[in-house]
Amino acid sequence: MSGIVVLISGNGSNLQALIDSVAAGDLDTEIAAVVSSDPDAYGLTRAERAGIPTEVMDLRNVLADGGNRLAFDVELAGVVAGYHPDLVVLAGWMLVLSEAFLEHFPGKVINLHPALPGTFPGTHAIERAYTAFQQGEITQTGVMVHRVIPEVDAGPVVTLERVPIFPGESLDDLEKRIHEVEHNLIVAAVDLSLRGEV
Ligand code: GRF
């Protein structure tokens, strides 16, 4: 089996965008599997409804069995490699991956992040951008998809989109607009990556 493997940790709205695009024939691939770091992630329900194989890789279990992050990344690489992916897509995956994982999929791992390159790496990026706007430090934020390196939300950019922030808008409004941009950008980034156009 080839296709893409999607790694998630939560709601899975970006996974849903990929599922819908494959179903509509807008993406010429298949989702070979969905791997979640959280057994309770709603994204697993989305995958099961679409008939996609799922796996759970819970770091807590590896640590409880006396393992460490390195052991987790090696085990995760084995699980993902079992699906022979053309591309590994991090769509809301919340753990940093080391070289012990990445070396198995050279140049074939991409990540979605709701901020522009070099800005607001890590969690709560939309909220932090909103606060920076309120303080007059920025006028816009954005969304990027980048190749993954063993660093938080860094690596060569595959594609990005700038998102203006409007005076007086609520954080909730900004988050809604950012997620809409994400749902289109993740599909475009997978398409570009599979065509080798990055
Ligand atoms: C997205 O905003 C993504 O950029 C970030 O985590 C969120 C995941 O959303 N890394 P979902 O689980 O795809 O709805």
Image (spheres, rainbow, N blue to C red):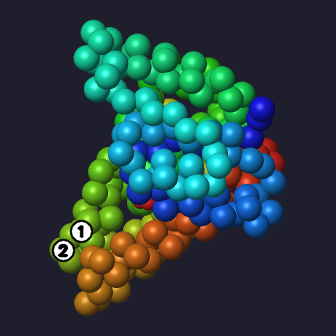
**Residue at position x 72%, y 28% from top?**
84
Query: In the rendered view, would you say 186 is above or below 6?
Result: below
On residue 135, the disc is: 2
Q: What x and y, as percent, mark residue 161?
A: 54, 67
Q: What x and y, as percent, mark residue 130?
A: 27, 71
Nearer the observer, 4 or 106: 4
Q: Are dots 1 and 2 in contact, CB under 8 Å?
A: yes
Q: What x and y, as percent, mark residue 143?
A: 48, 62
Nearer the observer, 24 or 44: 44
User: Quadrant of the rendered structure where residue 78 is?
Assistant: top right
- SS state under label 2: loop
Nearer the observer, 41 or 111: 41
Q: What x and y, as percent, mark residue 176?
A: 40, 76
Residue type of the residue flagged with mark 1:
Ala
Residue 103 visible (yes or no): no
Q: Is mark 2 within 8 Å of ligand 1?
A: no
Q: Name the residue beneath numbered marker 1.
A: 132
Query: In the rendered view, would you say 179 is above or below 79?
Result: below
